[in-house]
């Protein structure tokens, strides 16, 4: 890590705890709770109707219970299960650099088995084929995405700070390299970068979605808003997981 960080961590021990608890299937620990919170919040931000309790049941029992009269789209369930596998894949790659292929592999895991995967124009595990917008703004054209991602990676510092990670996320989301799933891939990449650079990770929570989107929208003019939003999320993550982290 290039500078002192308020929440600097022993990333190797944090990573070891995630890996060990994954193998042991430790209930109610760091790995277990991160699986549920990451899958629930990241998918909820993108429109999933699943509740946190439903997400927990899918993870813990591979079942789902009804909630009132609201129908649950099959893709919400599929993408939740895929999100659990995505976090596992990220943990497996913590010792490897992030590349364009990393991003594609994460997208393939997230979107496989969904309705999108059966659409001829939708590229699962590859960059988009059709132009798209985010928040009413144009993104990088499909024919320029590979170059834009290569440039993003080429200009990424070897030793990333918290601000570098925030900036990477903004630029990744501005490129919007995939037809769908950009936010979820981008947020798992942030989690990975934090661990790789000795910074406590955090989860973008659904109840802070408006601040998160505003931070992305205004980043070019005022990057501090997104940074402050992420710092507040890091505060909440620390408050929730300090009891696990401090004993590592």
Image (cartoon, rainbow, N blue to C red):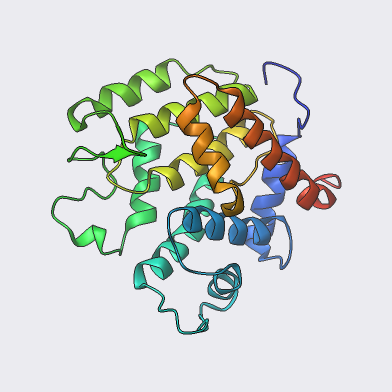
Question: Which residue is at a point 86% across and 47% down the rendered structure image?
Answer: 247
Could you tell whether 172 is left or right of 11 in the image? Answer: left
Which quarter of the figure has residue 55?
Answer: bottom right
**Whole-percent x and y of residue 203?**
61, 47
Query: In terms of depth relative to the viewer, which is nearer, 218 or 71?
Result: 218
**Whole-percent x and y of residue 219?**
50, 25
Question: Which residue is at a point 56% across and 22% down the rendered structure image?
Answer: 223
Quadrant showing the C terminus = top right
**Whole-percent x and y of residue 181?**
37, 48
Question: Which residue is at a point 59% across and 58% down the rendered structure image?
Answer: 35
Up-down relation of residue 6 to residue 45 (above or below): above
Query: In terms of depth relative to the viewer, which is nearer, 25 or 218?
Result: 218
Q: Is residue 94 visible?
A: no
Could you tell whether 235 is left or right of 114 in the image? Answer: right
Q: Is residue 104 visible?
A: yes
Up-down relation of residue 126 to residue 223 (above or below): below
- Total numbered circles: 0
Query: In terms of depth relative to the viewer, which is nearer, 14 or 161?
Result: 161
Up-down relation of residue 228 to residue 110 (above or below): above
Could you tell whether 9 is left or right of 189 in the image? Answer: right
**Whole-percent x and y of residue 197?**
64, 28
Question: Which residue is at a point 27% across and 45% down the rendered structure image?
Answer: 179
Which quarter of the figure has residue 152?
Answer: top left
- Residue sticking out furthest to the left: 120
Quadrant showing the N terminus = top right
């Amino acid at each position: 890590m290039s500078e002192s960080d308020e929440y600097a961590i022993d990333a190797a021990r944090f990573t070891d705890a995630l890996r060990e608890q994954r193998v042991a299937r430790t209930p109610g620990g760091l790995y277990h709770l991160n699986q549920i919170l990451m899958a629930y919040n990241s998918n909820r931000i993108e429109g999933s109707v699943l509740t946190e309790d439903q997400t927990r049941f899918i993870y813990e029992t591979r079942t789902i219970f009804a909630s009132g009269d609201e129908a649950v789209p099959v893709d919400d369930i599929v993408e939740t299960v895929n999100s659990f596998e995505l976090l596992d894949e990220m943990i497996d790659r913590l010792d490897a650099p992030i590349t364009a292929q990393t991003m594609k592999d994460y997208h393939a895991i997230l979107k496989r088995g969904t309705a999108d995967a059966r659409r001829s124009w939708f590229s699962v595990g590859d960059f988009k084929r059709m132009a798209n917008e985010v928040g009413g703004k144009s993104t990088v054209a499909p024919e320029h995405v590979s170059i834009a991602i290569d440039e993003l990676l080429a200009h990424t510092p070897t030793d990333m700070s918290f601000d570098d990670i925030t900036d990477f996320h903004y630029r990744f989301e501005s490129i919007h390299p995939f037809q769908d799933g950009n936010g979820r891939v981008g947020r798992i990449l942030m989690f990975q970068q934090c661990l790789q650079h000795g910074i406590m990770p955090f989860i973008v929570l659904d109840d802070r979605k408006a601040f998160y989107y505003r931070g992305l929208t205004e980043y070019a003019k005022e990057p501090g808003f997104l940074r402050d939003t992420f710092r507040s999320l890091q505060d909440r993550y620390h408050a929730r997981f300090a009891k696990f982290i401090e004993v590592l």
